[in-house]
Amino acid sequence: MARELTPPARAGAVICGAGVAGLSAAWHLAARRGLEQVVLVDPRPPLTLTSDKSTECYRNWWPDRPMIELTARSIALLDELAADSDDAFALNRNGYLYLTATAAGAAALERGARQISTAGAGDLRLHRGDPADPPWQAPHWNRLEAGPGGADLFLDAEQLRRCFPWVTPDAVAGLHARACGWLSAQQLGMLWLERARAAGAQLIEAAVVGVAREGRRVVGVDIARRGQVDRIATPCFVDAAGPFVADVAAFAGVELPVRHELHLKVFFDDELRVLPREAPLAIWTDPVTIAWSEEERAALAEDPGTAPLLAPLPAGVHFRPEGGLDSRSAILLWNYHSGATERAFPFEIDPLHLAVVLRGVSRIVPRFSVYLERGRRPYVDGGYYTKTAENRPLIGPLSPQLEGAWVLGALSGFGIMAAPAAGELLAAQIAGEAIPDWARAFLPGRYDDPDYRRRLATLDSGQL
Ligand SMILES: Cc1cc2nc3c(=O)[nH]c(=O)nc-3n(C[C@H](O)[C@H](O)[C@H](O)COP(=O)(O)OP(=O)(O)OC[C@H]3O[C@@H](n4cnc5c(N)ncnc54)[C@H](O)[C@@H]3O)c2cc1C
């Protein structure tokens, strides 16, 4: 992708970062709102830090109402854009399938599903193996066809297996959320860039190194490339720097409350075609205790760094097929090292990561354990979830003390699915328009409210 070499002297807006956040902002500002001279600045090729490392999935199924609204709006924008671009980014509605093998897990799935449905994510259809149950409508695999929405909750193990015969026989319940699926994030981001450029936006290969202000107003942005620093005069600066969002905010004298979690992704060649091709994203919601061999147990126990792998590991191992029916690829993930970490590039990959993830996925599809003996070396990559304490993004003014500085960040593990609507919300605020009430939950200024801070202090899961 060609990038401009000469920075303009002035810009309508300067956006720092060409990941999905910055590209969505550029699309909305330049292409959808006609703002002139939008300039994107990034020293890397677009989308190459975090945005091309994702699982590329989306859902409207969130426990938090503002997140339901944000992702529902994103899904509406994605549907429009797919229709308008001849589906340039392969959007599907294959769904998410949450699974459990315990009665307590089934009760928790039901409780959570009722709460999420009531919060506005759509109808909940119960399947108890009763003749009066509503019918389950299979998704149209890898196609974008409006499904029933909401979710189907299988509380009858037999019926769950009839619909998903590949799931481990000891699964007792499953929740199939329907306004969910995946897409090509790379293609989506490049489509935004193409449309923003067609509307006059520029992408400059440089790093933002400073924000110039006069009194309480932003007046310019300093960018560095090849040892030279230039200033672009602008009244509008957007910090969309992904894992560097807090470092860039510091250029404007603002502290942002974010932390980082490393998440890895295994790109796997399922040469024996063990995993189902026509599957939703499948997520195991119980903790998993790995059945290591005696020899492996002894070796793991010897090292304090690996001994925790003998204990139950956190819930959440998941996989999805990648590519069409003829493909053998799958994406496997398990953030069993949960928790915040120091950000480092390049980051280290746990040498046991693959061994652990293969065993985790085998918990969902037992036949997958055939790969434990096959000594494979799949591709592993990943990136950081940049998160706030309550896992809500930051979309709005960077600080009440600084006019013209904005942030679109802390997109955590939902940046692909949030970016379409997040960019729209930010562009509306830049244009001085009112935002919907639910979007106030994402304003960085929320932390100035002592009641909000008190509520956060009582959160045990860290997820609103
Ligand atoms: C393993 C994994 C799986 C994921 N799965 C999903 C998923 O299924 N669905 C989903 O919605 N999300 C998912 N995510 C999250 C999603 O990928 C991120 O939320 C999203 O990519 C963040 O986008 P961004 O634009 O904020 O950051 P980035 O993509 O990191 O872009 C930030 C850009 O800012 C640039 N930058 C930084 N500092 C400067 C500077 N000083 N000057 C100029 N430019 C600068 C960087 O070079 C970079 O290009 C996943 C993430 C990971 C790691």
Image: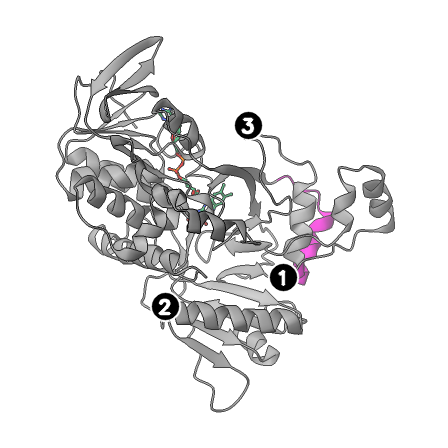
Residue 64, image x, y percentages = 42, 59
Circle 3 is placed at which residue position?
A: 344
Q: Which residue is mark 2?
A: 120
Q: Residues within 10 Å of mark 2 (few under 14, many from 20)?
A: some
Give the image's coloring scheme: one colour
Cα–Cα gap, marks 1 and 3: 32 Å
Tag 1: amino acid: Ile
- Compared across the picture, whether 259 is left or right of 410 comes to right
Is residue 92 among what the camera can see? no
Q: Residue at x 43, y 84 (%)?
A: 134
Q: Is residue 267 above or below residue 63?
A: above
For badge 3, the amino acid type reads Ala
Estimate the spatial distance between the alpha carbons at disc 2 and disc 1, rounded to whole Å. Answer: 29 Å
Q: Residue extending furthest front? A: 450
Determine whether, in the image, residue 149 is placed left or right of residue 163: left
Q: Residue furthest bottom?
A: 131
Q: Which residues are magenta?
A: 363-377
The location of residue 197, given as percent across then percent down, is 19, 33
Q: Which residue is mark 1?
A: 364
